[in-house]
Amino acid sequence: MEEELKCPVCGSLFREPIILPCSHNVCLPCARTIAVQTPESEQHLPALLHPRAPAAGPGPGAAAGSAPLDYDCGAGGGAGGGGGGGGSGGVDHADKLSLHSETDSGYGSYTPSLKSPNGVRVLPLVPPPPGSSAAAAAAAAAPRGGGGGASSSLTCPQCHRSASLDHRGLRGFQRNRLLEAIVQRYQQSRAAASAAAKCQLCDRSPPEAAAVMCEQCEVLYCAACQVKCHPSRGPFAKHRLVPPPSQQGAAGGASGGPGGAAPSKAPGAARKPPTCADHELENYSMYCVTCRTPVCYQCLEEGKHAKHEVKPLGAMWKQHKAQLSQALNGISDKAKEAKEFLVQLKNILQQIQENGLDYEACLVAQCDALVDALTRQKAKLLTKVTKEREHKLKVVWDQINHCTLKLRQSTGLMEYCLEVIKENDPSGFLQISDALIKRVQVSQEQWVKGALEPKVSAEFDLTLDSDPLLQSIHQLDFIQMKCRVPVSVPPVPLLQLEKCCTRNNSVTLAWRMPPFSHNPVEGYILELDDGDGGQFREVYVGKETLCTIDGLHFNSTYNARVKAFNSSGVGPYSKTVVLQTSDVAWFTFDASSAHRDIVLSNDNQTATCSSYDDRVVLGTAAFSKGVHYWELHVDRYDNHPDPAFGVARINVVKDMMLGKDDKAWAMYVDNNRSWFMHCNSHTNRTEGGVSKGATVGVLLDLNKHTLTFFINGKQQGPSAFENVEGVFMPALSLNRNVQVTLHTGLEIPQTVRPPKLPSN
C-alpha cells in the first residue's frame, strides 16, 4: 500500500495532498513547484516553442510568475510594484481552461516546451508582441502589478494533462483529507512497528536493533547476524538488503518535499472537518450528482449547483462505499487467483529444477552407456586385431625358422661336396659320389615351388566401417514434440528393484517410467499372483509409483508385474519380480483395534488392562496359510484371574472374555487348570495352570487346520480345535490382574500330539 501513499513528484508520503482535475493526487508543496506560467495568447506560440527562444530579460515583466503560488494566493495577485507578478485581470484567453465550467472537463492537453529539473515541461514567459490584445491587457493591468499578462497552469506528473488555475490559484483544488488521514494512520502503524524492529536471529537478550532487512527472506538482521547468517555472496548475492521499517520511516519523515515545505501534521492531531472550497464557513452536507463533488447549502442557494441534481452526502457516501466494496471483491478474487498462480509458478520452478537435474542425470547416464558400449566394442575389435597380428607373426616366424634350417643344411652339404670335388683320389671319390649325388638331388627337391614365397601378407585385411556410427552420433538429439501428435500407449515401466522389499506378509513394490518417454501416463495397474504360481490379479490401479500390499501368505513366493495406461490404451507389462514373504511372523499387539481399557507398553509387546473386566486385544498380523507359533510370557498374575489365549476374526467382540462369541477360538486358564472355549462352549478341561513367570504357547497350523496350546512347553491335551479355516489374528483377553509380554518369530515345536479321536 505504501506506493499508493507516495507523491509522484517527490516520492515521499503525501503531505497536504490535493486532488487534480484528472483525479490524481499531488502534495501541495510539490504543486507549488510544478505550477507554471502560460502566455495569455498563443499567437506567438511557435516562437515560444523554439528551443532557442530568449528568456525574459530584466524589466517590468521579467519576474512574472516567479513568485510561488501558495494555496491561498491567486494566479496573478502580486502586490508589489516593479518586479511583481503580472495579473491576468479580465483578459479573455482563447486557450484558457476553466476549472468550474459545467461543460469543460477541467483539463486539457497543453504541452510546454522546456523541461524543468523536476521533469515537468515549463514554457518560458516571453512578452507578447506590441499592439496585440494581450499587450493591451497587460498595459491596462500595469498599475496593479506592473508585469506582463500571464495565467498559471498545472501539469499532472502522472497523466501529463494540464489544468489552468483560476483566480484562487492552488486553493481551487480540493484537499484530499481522506488520503491525508490514511497517510497519518500509516505513519502511526509504521512508528509502532519501528519500536519492534529488532534482529530476528540474535542470541542476545534483548536482541540487537535491526540494521537491515532482506526483501527476499523477509528477515531482520543486526550487523553481526547479517555478516554471519546472510553474507553478500553465494546464493545471497542477488538478495536486496534495505533499511528496516523504522529507518525507512525516519528517512521518509525527515526528507522534505520540493520547496522545503514543512512535514505534515502529527499523527495524533485532530482533523478539522472539511469545509467548502467556495464557502469556507460552510461544511459539506450534500453531493452534486451532476458535478460529482460534495457541496454545501450555500452552493445550492447561490452557486452554480442550484439547478443540479443533489443527494444527501451520507447516503451517497454509503452508496459509493458499497460500490467500492463490490469492486474490491472482484479484485480480491483476482488477487487470490494471482497468489495461487504464483504458488503454481513456484512449484513449476521447483519442478523445472528437479526435472532438469533428472534429465541431466539421465542424459549423462545414456551418454555414459554409449561410451561404455563403444569402449567394450573397441576392446573386442582390438582383440581381433591382436589375434590377427599374432597369427601373422607366428606364420612368418615359423617360415623363417624352417627356411633357416633348410638353408643351413643345404649350405653345409654344398661346402662338403666342394671339398670332395677338390680331392684327387678317383677311387675314393667314386665310393661316395653316388650317395652325394642323391643327397644333393633330394636337397634340391626340398625347395619346391612356393617354398621361397611368404605364406602371409604384411597387410591386414580388416576394415572398420565407422561412418554410419559417426553419422548417428552427429544426428543424436532430443525428440522434440513441436506439435500435438497422436498419443501412443505408454512404454514399459521399469521396476526399481532396490526399493522393492518384503516385511512379514506384506510386499512393497516401486517402479518408474523410462527416461525421455514422451507418451503421457494416466495411471498404473499392478498385478500379483496368488503365491502358488496361479493367475495374476489386479491389486492396485492408480497414479502412484509405490505400493504396499498387506495380508499375504507367510512363507510364500509371489510374482508381481506392472503396466501403464493412458487414453490410447494399456502399455506392455514390465518384467516380473519375484518376492518371498517371511518364513515366520513378527508382530506386536495392535493398539488401533484394541479395547480402550487395554494398556500397551514395550513397543506394543506388553499388554495389561485398566479394568477388572476382561478386554480383548489382537495382534498386527493376519494368518490364512502356513504354520505359525508365538508365546506369551506372564509377567504378573494376581488374585487368580482367567486370561484367555488364542485366535480371532477381525470383528471379534472386545468387551468380554475371548471365546464367548463365534469369532474367537481360545484357551482360558487359571492357576490350576485350563479349558478350551468357542461360542461360550467349555471343553477339554486339562490340569495345569499359570502363575507369574509362566509361558503360554499358541500353535496355529492352517495347513492341517488345527489350533494347539502349550503351557511351559507342555501341550495342553490334544489339538484344541479342528477345521479351523479362514483368516485369523492372534488374540488375548485379560483384566487388570494380569500382564503378559508377546514373543514372536519363534521356531515351531516339533512334538505335537494328534487330535483326540472320537470313541466308538
Image (cartoon, rainbow, N blue to C red):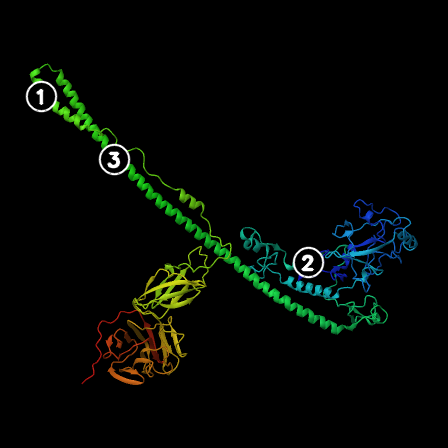
Quadrant of the snapshot with the N terminus: bottom right
Q: Position of residue 32 (x, y in %)?
A: 79, 56
Residue at the top extreme, as displayed: 424
The residue carrying mark 3 is: 394
The residue depicted at 68 percent of the width and 61 percent of the height is: 4
**Which kind of residue does numbered mark 3 sit on?**
Lys
The residue carrying mark 2 is: 250
From mark 2 to mark 1, how far is it between C-alphas?
A: 136 Å
Q: Is residue 454 left or right of residue 489?
A: left
Q: Quadrant of residue 458?
A: top left
Q: Position of residue 251 (x, y in %)?
A: 69, 56
Q: Is residue 236 left or right of residue 106?
A: left
Q: Is residue 285 visible?
A: no
- In contact (CB < 8 Å): disc 2 and disc 1: no
The residue carrying mark 1 is: 432
Pointer 2 or 1: first along the chain:
2
> Exactly how many numbered labels are in the figure?
3
Instruction: Name the foreground residue: 565 vs 150.
Output: 565
Label 3: element kind: helix
Label 2: element kind: helix
Quadrant of the snapshot with the C terminus: bottom left
Q: Which mark is residue 124?
A: none
Q: Is residue 347 visible?
A: yes
Q: Is residue 621 left or right of residue 42?
A: left
**Which kind of residue does numbered mark 1 sit on?**
Ile
Instruction: Name the foreground residue: 485 vs 125.
Output: 485
Instruction: Name the foreground residue: 499 vs 129.
Output: 129
Label 1: element kind: helix
**Which kind of residue does numbered mark 2 sit on?**
Ala
